[in-house]
Structure formats: C-alpha cells, structure tokens
Image (cartoon, rainbow, N blue to C red):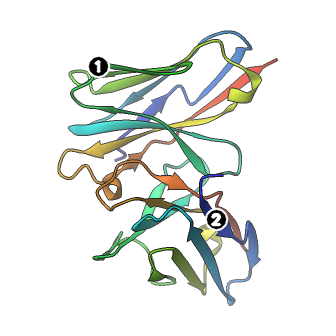
Amino acid sequence: SQQGEEDPQALSIQEGENATMNCSYKTSINNLQWYRQNSGRGLVHLILIRSNEREKHSGRLRVTLDTSKKSSSLLITASRAADTASYFCATGTLSSGSARQLTFGSGTQLTVLP
Amino acid sequence: ETGVTQTPRHLVMGMTNKKSLKCEQHLGHNAMYWYKQSAKKPLELMFVYSLEERVENNSVPSRFSPECPNSSHLFLHLHTLQPEDSALYLCASSPRPGDEKLFFGSGTQLSVL
C-alpha cells in the first residue's frame, strides 16, 4: 500500500482563491516534501518539512505537518492560473531519510480558473 | 531548467525493439535515479545509482536495464517491452544518496505498441 495519499484527487478553484491539499501517510517519517508537476513534465521540489517541524512557509506556500494524525497540508494562497498543475507529497521514511526511500502519492490535480 | 536533461522527450517503440533512454545532470550530483510514472499511479522508484552502489526495486522486470558510466550520465536500456510499460520515465538526481531533495528531468514519454 502506498505511503502518501493526497486528498482531494482533483481541485478546481477561481484565480485569487486559496487552494488546500492534504496528504495522509501510514508509517513514521523523518520528513515530508511537496512537489509540483506541470502536465507532461518532471517534478519540481517545492518545500520540505521535517518531522520535528509543525509549519513552514515559502512565498505563497504554507505547509503544515501533524505527526500525531500522520497528515500534512499544502496551502497555496492567492492562486494564479499558472499554479495549475499536479501536486504530490512524498515521505521520507524514518529508517534512512535518504532520497532512495522517498515514497510518492498519486497527486492532486489543481486547476485554477482565470 | 532543473539541470537534469532527458532525451528523447518522446519515444514510440514496438515490442521487439531495443532502445535507450538517456539522462544527463549538470549539477555535480553524485546520485541518480530512474522513476516510472503511469497514469493515476504513484511514482515508482526503479533504480538508484550512487558512487558507492546501485540499488534497485526488485519488482522491476529484467527488460529494463540501467547503466551509469559516470556520475553525470544515466541510461535506461529497454528491450522486448510490453504495452503496459508505456509511461513517463523520469530521471532525477541529488547531491548525495542520503540527500532528501530530488531534482527531476522533464521525462521521456514512452509508448509501446
């Protein structure tokens, strides 16, 4: 069974609104990352949050991590049409924390309507 | 540009063909990876190469054969593929095997007829 699962699978919002995506996971982690993927392209790293952190910000991005609930959320504020993409969470397992142990979810497809 | 270049961008091949995917990173990283991305499925790690070792997912069929001649180049040799192997194949790199952040190429969209 996969480690990270994003929710919702698809999200459609108007430009200027906030977009929230959630990620749940099953086993203990030492970090959680969010990546973005434009259609037919590679993934781009957005932000990494470690298991001892609860919240992190980067520009219009805000990530929270609740290790007791094994969940994370990604908030994109004041969304733009250019934010349209798939967003993936990836968990680094506690045993090694190395990239080879990153496990990706199936992603949330975000559509921002102009 | 992420500094990781993959060629070709698109590839169509028959089940009896032999082809190779190429990945080159210009970041001075020492670990490289192949991932497979199928529609509506999570990314699947296929192979990891570092200066010290090669790590592979034991569920990857032998019709996929990786080659890493140096720390900047990574190949994925394909032979006698099946239609279900059609997917986006992504190469990634990281400074060291233990680093957490991955830098991805744009991928090769493979169609097996």
Left or right of residue B55, residue A37 in this image:
right
Residue A88 x/y as whole percent: 50, 38
Give the residue at x 45% y 65%: B33
Q: Who is closer to the viewer here, B20 or A60?
A: A60
Chain designation of label 1: A
Tell me if I can see residue B29 in this picture.
yes
| Secondary element type, mark 2 | strand
Query: Is B40 drawn above or below residue B5 in the view shown?
Result: above
Mark 2 residue type: Thr
Q: Which residue position is annotated with label 1? A: A54
Q: Which residue position is annotated with label 2? A: B5
Residue B29 x/y as whole percent: 44, 64
Q: CA distance from mark 1 to mark 2?
A: 35 Å
Left or right of residue B34, residue A4 in this image:
left
Give the residue at x 68% y 28%: A83
Residue B99 x/y as whole percent: 33, 53
Mark 1 residue type: Arg
Give the residue at x 30% y 45%: A92
The mark found on residue A18 in the picture is none
- For disc 2, the neighbor class at 10 Å (few under 14, some 14 to 19, many from 20) is many
Q: Who is closer to the viewer here, A106 or A84?
A: A84
